[in-house]
Image (tube, helix red, strand yellow):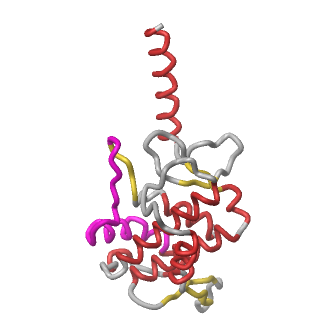
Amino acid sequence: MRLSAACADVAHARAVTVDRGRTRDALADDAGATAWLRAIGDRLTSRTGLQADRFDEAAVPVAGALRDALRRLAAEATDDPRPPATAPDLARSEAIATLNATAEVWPQLVWPEGGRPSVAYRGSGTSARLAVQLIAHQAVELFAGPDRDRLRPCLAPNCLLFFLKNTPRREWCSPACGNRVRVARHYRRHHATDNA
């Protein structure tokens, strides 16, 4: 899996969501952020050797700041028409600085005796901090690489996600969002004729 694709995949863990018109932030407290990191941990294990059950709460403030920076930069990259869900006043320069400061990982060669060589990423700090650093590193690869042009905001009702458009017809982050759009369209069509 390419790094940028992994970064986009991590977004589906939904750190910020909308439920009945209210924004819910999974990174708002230590317990929620730790649970979110554990939920995405298996997606990062192959690149880091991390064990998600060992994630602690040390990376919680960094994870929230990184999420805000990524949302700000993704909104700019995609001309996202939605209002910011988090950190509406975050400046572009601050978002870039946060991303760059957090992307402190480096590749290392792992080559077991009799096995195939592979790459693992290492960083400083705790396992949770390394997970956040790897997400930042993947985001740098995404924003600076060719996949940036495939990045899209999901414009389904109550969805705050971004996704990589991997087929020409794809318009939403998931089939569930596509279904919500079709149901809303159907509802508007039938209720417009009922009221006419």
Which quadrant would residue 92 be assigned to in this image? bottom right
* Left or right of 180, for residue 54: left
Measured as percent of width and height from the top left, residue 77 is found at: 64, 60
Asked if 162 appears above or below 179 in the picture, the reply is below
Instruction: Identify the magenta region.
Output: 20-44
Which residue is at a point 49% across and 60% down the rendered structure image?
Answer: 11
* Of 130 and 98, the residue lying toward us: 98
Measured as percent of width and height from the top left, residue 165 is found at: 65, 51
Asked if 98 appears above or below 165 in the picture, the reply is below
Which residue is at a point 65% across and 83% down the rendered structure image?
Answer: 116
Q: Quadrant of the N terminus?
A: bottom right
Main SS of residues in magenta: helix
Measured as percent of width and height from the top left, residue 163 is found at: 58, 54
* Of 24 and 170, the residue lying toward us: 24
Which residue is at a point 52% across and 29% down the rendered structure image?
Answer: 182
Q: Is residue 95 magenta?
A: no
* Left or right of 55, for residue 174: right
Asked if 123 appears above or below 175 in the picture, the reply is below
* Of 169 and 81, the residue lying toward us: 81
Which residue is at a point 39% across and 52% down the rendered structure image?
Answer: 17
Q: Is residue 34 magenta?
A: yes
Measured as percent of width and height from the top left, residue 49 is found at: 47, 81
Give the total number of marks visible in the rendering.
0
* Of 16 and 80, the residue lying toward us: 80
